[in-house]
Image (tube, coloured by chain):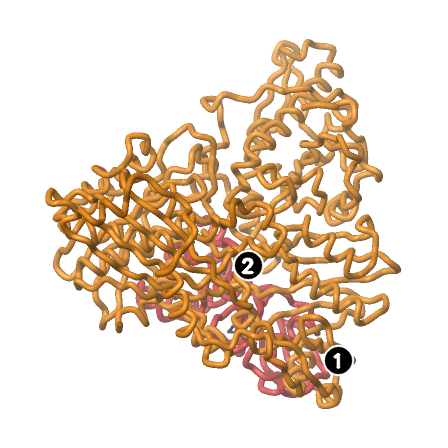
Amino acid sequence: MTEHTRRQFLSASAGLVVAVTLPLPGRAQSGAAAILGQDAPTQGDFAPNAFIRVAPDDTVTVLIKHIEFGQGPYTGLSTLVAEEMDADWSQMRAEAAPANAELYANLFFGMQGTGGSTAMANSYMQMRKAGAAARAMLVAAAAEEWGVPAGEIEVAQGVVRHGASDRSARFGELAERAAGMTVPEDPPLKDPGQFKLIGTEVQKLDTKPKSTGQATFTLDVYREGMETVVVRHPPFFGGRVANFDPAPAMAVPGVVAVREIPSGIAVYATSTAAALKGREALDVEWDDTEAETRSSEEMLQAFSEAAAAETLVAEEAGDVDGALEGAEQVIETEFRFPYLAHAPLETLDAVIEMRDGVAELWMGSQFPSLDKPTLAQTLGVDPSNVIINVMFAGGSFGRRAQPDAHLAAEIAAIAKAAGRNGSWKLLWTREDDLHGGYYRPMTVHRMRGGIDAEGNIVGWTDVLANQSIMAGGPMEAMMDKGLDPTAYEGATKMPYDLVNFRTSWARMESPVPVLWWRSVGHTHTGYATEVFLDMLLEAAGKDPVQGRLDLLRADAGRDRAVLERVAAMAGWDGQRVKGDRGYGIALHESFNTYVAQIAEVSNDNGMPRVHRVWCAVDCGVAVNPGVIRAQMEGGIGYGLTALLYSQITLLPGGRIAENNFDDYRMLRINEMPAVEVEILDTDHDPSGVGEPGTPPIGPAVGNAWRALTGQTVTRLPFTVGVQS
Amino acid sequence: MYNLTVNNREVSVDVPGDTPLLWVLRDELRLTGTKFGCGVAQCGACTVMMDGMTRRSCVTPIEMADGAFVETIEGLDTPESQAVQAAWVANDVPQCGWCQSGQVVSATALLTEIPQPTDDDIDNAMAGNICRCATYQRIRKAIHDAASTLEG
Ligand code: FES
Ligand code: FES
């Protein structure tokens, strides 16, 4: 910590606040975001600890810099603070930190944002230090008040105690005095052996309000006089409005305005029902001259041809061409993956209020640091007059992490087109969501593998063709030599010693916007690499578990450990089929978290029915084992939906075939396997769990299906692939 | 003008007869616990009780609810709903939370009808409620736990 002189504790109605200099006195609860939503401190401020408020009523509120959509940062980050403060879990509260890039940056991104399963990893030391600093100041306050040495004071479960003089105080009683204490330069942290809360299953802080309908999401925000707005977007990607007639929409009672905005035609109404009816009545003519008019089939064909042509090399070792040339047996396969919509259960939505040059936004903003300047720019207001309330979001899976800030841009355009003070709620329907793009990229993998006479894998090539997520946006600067690692991550840096291998990439272009989808490139590389490996091991006459263990590099200890653990959990005995059940295994590391899964599958009228899944995970120190297990369960369910059912299909001409959950099917409770999770006990720093549970389930089921039926499904989803 | 009872309160709303009950509850009555997920009776996020039966409020026009007795997540208050919600909390069921009002309403209705449901009963009663976060395993366990509490 540096420049601690610039930091101070503020004594305010809220009590002890660990913060940088704040321009206004603290206020409780809902006002906090507004208060802190000021422009960042001037350059040079180092302000990692604007995270904690201790109120006179003893509650400790942690300002959470990461959006909560079920992956658990409210609970996880509060646990870190409570641990180092020696607080009692029952006194902990969490609320969203406001948009302030300097105070609340993701330390891995350098801006405020959530993604890549980084919330816990980047916050681990930061939040612990914040808690330790607060503890030290509470102790200093008690020492001063009681006239005893600080070193004799102990803290446990939210009580500060001096044993010799038998005095004690709760945090709230010390808050005001603590606010005047010096911020410690580098407060000592506990040894992991001293942890009391980290590693336990504390109750999630957001569980109760989410079980009683009390949690407030964006769609639940109602402002005085607010209008609801829905937008008719072009029915194909890259399309534009040619002509429109607002009259039929305006004739719908409750519709108050129809405006053209950059993303389409916006219908403003006094109620949601009226807005939807008005949009239905709209008459729009579209211009598709620059639109994607190819069908998915045509695109897949083009991608496949591109993968056969010259491509960019992402990673290479040895002499793979020579090795394949000299191989005893060469196996070739092409895997095809569709576009996928994230389909969070809460569709995209946002509320904006304009008050004389001040814009206040309520949104499940995953990148506040990008949404804020977009709002400011579109509306022509100073960034210091943009207030962002980061709301609970009903899921994201990557959908709300928008490098182009398109949702913020749309709600801003709606307010701008209205051209007055007021408030507007933007709602995307499920059809808007599924038709709206920002899909997991459609992807082709062309793979070749060679085996020698002894059954050793001697060569491996993987050529991918798909669109780039990072190109053409603020992330493009992170691309090196024209390579976008999110396109092929997981098909590089593999844990296996393949000796001669090459992974290369053909970058495809289309107006269809693509985005990260729960585990990003790993969504397809996990399937392609682990199913293909299974094929090679089978051809070489090797056991899927032992074959993998034999192939692991010497330094792949964490991969080895999860693989061995999952094999033990499932009682793996080398039999890939028992009775009517097939068993398949997959191992895949993503975001520095290592996961291995075994799936038990039967054949249910030509489709896999998944009965059980064993899952072993190493995500470093397990801050909350309950949250980790929940994320593995959820990641498996999410991956299973995609594997079995999901595809977004462009029809000839470019329109989308799928409309709603009737044709974009979700896994339901009767299809959910029994999932058993074991967490490895390791002392690595914690890594994320939101995404890594997803990649292995597809190949585990795919490999179980291969074992059971002999069919390798190379085209996803299974509903399509089992027939080809 | 339509008159109905919502959470034991008599309300009158002046909206077109084809307005879905979901948007009446949310936009007019500000009962925001009932969620929108699909609008076409596919996801169950909008589930409420109407005259003692579960109902997808997104496809229920208000004219059909005229004179009806409606209960939303905010109004649930029976031994069954209390047991369900306690089990939901104890099992840390919710992730993003968006589906959970509908899940809790459906689970409460199930236990009111069948106090000791089997796994098949649970599948039948709950398959209309999508959880995109796939909290299904915990939902199942929480329903069994709630059933035990009610029995005990
Ligand atoms: S919103 Fe009514 S069932 Fe989905
Ligand atoms: S908890 Fe997210 S949809 Fe069910």
Q: Is residue A15 above or below residue A72?
A: above
Structural distance between the alpha carbons of marks 2 and 1:
27 Å
Q: Is residue B57 above or below residue A438?
A: below
B49 vs A18, nearest the viewer: A18
Residue located beneath label 1 in the image = A258
At 73% from the left and 52% from the top, the residue drawn is A372
Chain the render paints red: B
At 60% from the left and 37% from the top, the residue drawn is A107
Residue A637 location, x and y as percent?
A: 39, 58
SS state under label 2: loop
Residue located beneath label 2 in the image = A399
The disc, 2 or 1, on the residue closer to the chain's N-terminal end is 1
Q: Label 2 is placed on what type of residue?
A: Arg
SS state under label 1: strand
Would you say A697 lies left or right of B80 here?
left
Residue A70 location, x and y as percent?
A: 52, 52
Q: Are the residues under badges 2 and 1 in a single subunit?
A: yes
Q: Chain of mark 1?
A: A
Q: Label 1 is placed on what type of residue?
A: Val
Quadrant housing the N terminus of chain A: top right
